[in-house]
Image (cartoon, helix red, strand yellow):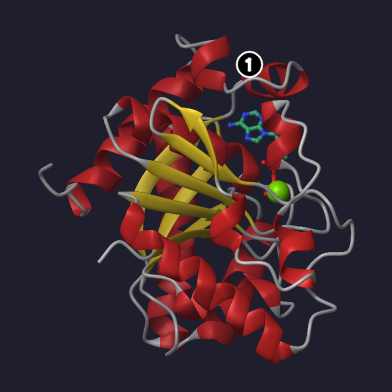
Amino acid sequence: MTGLTVLASGKGGVGKTFLAVSLAHALTHLGRRVLLVDADLGLANIDVQLGLDESLGLGRAIAGGLDPATLVQDRGGGLSTLTGAGTGKGLDGLATARLEDAVERLAGLAPGFDDVLVDLPSGLERVGPAFIRKARRLLLIGSNEPTSLTDNYALLKLTRGAAPRPLFVANAVADAAEGRAAHAALARACRHFLDLECAYLGAVRQDRRVPEAIRRQMPLCLRSPQAPAAADIAVLAKRLTAETPAPAR
Ligand SMILES: Nc1ncnc2c1ncn2[C@@H]1O[C@H](COP(=O)(O)OP(=O)(O)O)[C@@H](O)[C@H]1O
Ligand SMILES: [Mg+2]
């Protein structure tokens, strides 16, 4: 079963939205059918990073009791999106039952795709953990900063026992060694204090073409296909597909 692949982090500003958008594109380049979901409704960044204009987003759909399936937009080339604009309020105000129902309905869309990537809000508030508990795969995004490490540790501690085994992605690091060091520090704490294995997917380098592409509201792989960060993301996408091959069709 496909299930949801959620991109989470304890701390904000570590690159979840950038990686969700970029991985979604990289996966479509590998021939996969991808649904990209913006669940960070309060901030709703995906439509901004992609330069989309959404009048009816996921937030409004959930608030109004609409089926999210009716809001999936086919963007061509294997990419579909379910973006978050249209509320400015976030999912935090929703009753728990409504929130869980929304997560359930999104999970119900997964069988129609090879990958469903969900960009989560940062932190330990209800929305992130609610998605993490229903996810098939947890991509935990972090940098090599101590605050990123401690906040990711806190998120894993909170969801321990109810979440899939985390796969760590180091973002905006100087080089591969810094990425491995960031993972090693988190993995050590998880093993020692939580009895939890934290696996490593890989690293994306700090690259000035990333903010440049975001400013232009274009995916990095289209704006700067030769950028080191774009090459790193292509490698991560390949590793993800090696884990879950698409069914023959
Ligand atoms: N690999 C990278 N290299 C350089 N800058 C990056 C990289 N990844 C993210 N950034 C910068 O960090 C900012 C925050 O990223 P974003 O994806 O919005 O984080 P989050 O969704 O986790 O809050 C982006 O606007 C971008 O400028
Ligand atoms: Mg974000």
Above or below, 103 against 176 in this view is below
Q: Is residue 109 left or right of residue 102?
A: left
- Residue 138 visible in the snapshot: no
Q: Position of residue 4 (x, y in %)?
A: 42, 63
Dividing the image into 4 quarters, which one contains the N terminus?
bottom left
Q: Position of residue 121 (x, y in %)?
A: 70, 61
Label 1, secondary structure: give it: helix
- From the viewer's side, name the closer residue of 97 and 45: 97
Q: Residues within 10 Å of mark 1 (few under 14, many from 20)?
A: some
Ligand 1 quadrant? Answer: top right
- From the viewer's side, name the closer residue of 101 and 230: 101
CB of residue at label 1: within 8 Å of ligand 1? yes
Q: Position of residue 202 (x, y in %)?
A: 37, 43
Q: Amino acid at mark 1?
A: Arg
Q: Position of residue 126 (x, y in %)?
A: 71, 80
**What residue is at 35 percent from the left and 38 percent from the top?**
236
- Residue 52 visible in the snapshot: yes
- From the viewer's side, name the closer residue of 129 and 151: 129
